[in-house]
Image (cartoon, rainbow, N blue to C red):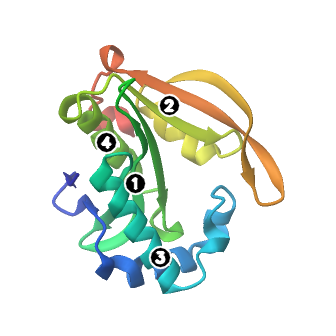
Amino acid sequence: MKLHITDQLSVTPFTIEDAQALFELTDESRESLRKWLPWVDRIQRVEDTRQFIEFANMDREAQTRLIGAIKYNHTIIGVAGFNEVDWTNQIAKIGYWLGFEYEGKGWMTAVVRELIHYAFNEMELNRVEIRVAVHNVRSQKIPKRLGFANEGCIRQAEKLYDRFVDHTLYGLVKTEWKQPTEDELI
C-alpha cells in the first residue's frame, strides 16, 4: 500500500533503511507518544525499530496489517495504516501517530481520509474502525471530522503501562462514507 496524499505528503511501505529515522522520531517524541501508546518503552535501540519494520513487512505480505511511514517531503513524520485487517468480515482498524513537532497541521486527517478511501475503494472493505483512548481528545478529532459514528466505550480496552484505559470506538461503513471537502476538514 502506497498512498500519495499531496505532492509533499505520502504513506509508503517501510524499508529497513527507514529504521534509523523512525527510531529517532520515536525517541524524540517518546514523552508525547507514551501518553497513549503502550509499546514506546520497548523501543530502546535502532535494532528494536528494525525488528518492528521486519514484522510489519511480514504482516503486509500476509495482508493482516498494512502500515507504513508517513513522509512529508521524504522525511518520516509518523506512522499510519491498518493495524488489523479482517478480510472475512471486511473490516479494517486504523492506527496512527505523528512525531510531536508535526502535530496540529492537519496532515493526519488527510492521511486517514486517504486510508478510508483506500479501504473502501481499493480493498473493497465494508467497515473501518478507529479506537481512541477516551481522554485522547486530540486524536478523537480525526474520526469526528471524517464522519465516523461514536459507537460507544470499550471499558479497560488497553493496558497503558501501569493502568488500563477505556477506548471510544468510532466506526464508519462504506454506505455512510462521504468524502469530505478540504473546507469541511478544517
| Image spot of residue 86 (x, y percent) | 40, 33
| Mark pair 2, 1: CA separation | 17 Å
Front disc: 4 or 3: 3
Tell me if residue 180 comes above or below residue 71 in the rendering.
above
Residue at the disc numbered 2: 144
Q: Are marks 4 and 3 in contact (CB under 8 Å)?
A: no
Residue at the disc numbered 4: 115
Residue at the disc numbered 1: 80
**In what element is the residue under mark 4?**
helix
Outermost residue toward the top in this view: 175
| Mark pair 4, 3: CA separation | 23 Å
Tell me if residue 74 comes above or below residue 109 in the rendering.
below
Residue at the disc numbered 3: 49
Front disc: 2 or 4: 4
| Image spot of residue 106 (x, y percent) | 39, 51
Question: Residue at image x 30%, y 82%?
Answer: 17
The quarter of the picture where the C terminus appears is: top left
What's the amino acid at mark 4?
Leu
Q: What is the crowding at mark 1: few (fewer than 14 residues within 10 Å), some, or many (at least 20)?
A: many
Question: Residue at image x 19%, y 54%?
Answer: 6
- Marker disc for residue 9: none
Q: Earlier in the sequence, mark 4 or mark 3?
A: 3
Q: Are marks 4 and 1 in contact (CB under 8 Å)?
A: yes
| Image spot of residue 14 (x, y percent) | 31, 67
Question: Residue at image x 25%, y 34%?
Answer: 117
| Mark pair 2, 4: CA separation | 15 Å
